[in-house]
Image (cartoon, rainbow, N blue to C red):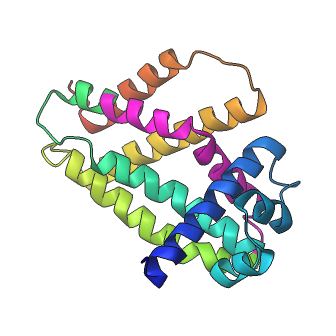
């Protein structure tokens, strides 16, 4: 027999998956709690019990997207291979994550809800935790790179702003463009920041 925590976790997972699918198919503006509830096979009340209102669901979708990214990158083997190879592997892994519908839905939500005070109050604490987790992940991945703290911060910012930009472009112009050259340029830029002499 499943525990209350297990049932609650399964319900949350169904709601998040339904929200991802609705946003991917119909867009953020046309997605409503009733639509998410129908797709998840739940009542609106069950969703409200778990998440509160739509802002709570959306904040959970964004948090789940970032949690998944961090968990995937943390699983990358940390080794002392040459820096260019390590950076290329990180960029490729992160782009694979960014290219998923769930990640694109999370980015769309974060952009659309950025001025909503309720969404911000629900999501801001978790996003702050995620930022810290990403920083720890980064420093663990590049633990042996003798760069300054400022260089690491600049390299992180370049990585995330470039991937966010490529993702937004793909969302706005939904044609399958080959971004391999962009990813190589991004990886080269990160290497130049972390180790200008390489």
Residue 46 in the image: state x and y as whole percent: 71, 79
Q: Is residue 96 left or right of residue 188?
A: right
Residue 67 point in image, percent of width and height: 45, 59
Apparent side of residue 116 relative to residue 61 in the rendered image (left or right): right
- On whether residue 18 falls in the magenta region, the answer is no
Quadrant of the rendering where the C terminus is positioned: top left
Q: Nearer the viewer, residue 126 or 82?
A: 126
Instruction: Assign the N terminus to one quadrant of the image.
Output: bottom left
Using the image as rendered, state which of residue 198 and residue 3 is in the foreground: 3
The vertical placement of 35 against 1, above or below, is above
Where on the picture, by quarter, is residue 137?
bottom left
The residue located at (24%, 31%) in the rendering is 86
Is 88 displayed left or right of 53 in the figure?
A: left
**Does residue 105 show up magenta in the picture?**
yes
In the foreground, 28 or 42: 42
Over which residues does the magenta segment extend? 89-116
Residue 118, placed above or below residue 41: below
Residue at 54%, 64% in the rendered image: 63
């Amino acid at each position: 027999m499943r525990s209350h925590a297990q049932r609650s976790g399964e319900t949350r997972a169904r709601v998040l998956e339904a929200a991802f699918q609705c946003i991917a198919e119909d867009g953020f503006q046309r997605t409503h709690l009733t639509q998410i509830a129908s797709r998840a096979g739940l009542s609106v009340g069950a969703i409200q019990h778990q998440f509160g209102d739509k802002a709570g669901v959306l904040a959970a979708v964004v948090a789940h997207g970032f949690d998944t990214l961090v968990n995937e990158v943390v699983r990358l083997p940390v080794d002392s291979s040459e820096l260019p190879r390590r950076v290329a592997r990180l960029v490729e892994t992160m782009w694979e994550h960014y290219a998923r519908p769930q990640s694109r839905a999370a980015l769309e939500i974060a952009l659309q809800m950025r001025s909503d005070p309720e969404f911000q109050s629900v999501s801001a604490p978790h996003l702050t935790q995620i930022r810290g987790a990403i920083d720890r992940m980064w420093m663990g991945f590049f633990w042996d790179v003798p760069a300054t703290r400022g260089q690491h911060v600049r390299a992180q910012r370049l990585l995330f702003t470039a991937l966010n930009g490529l993702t937004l472009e793909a969302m706005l112009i939904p044609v399958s463009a080959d971004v391999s050259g962009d990813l190589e340029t991004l990886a080269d830029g990160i290497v130049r920041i972390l180790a200008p002499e390489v």
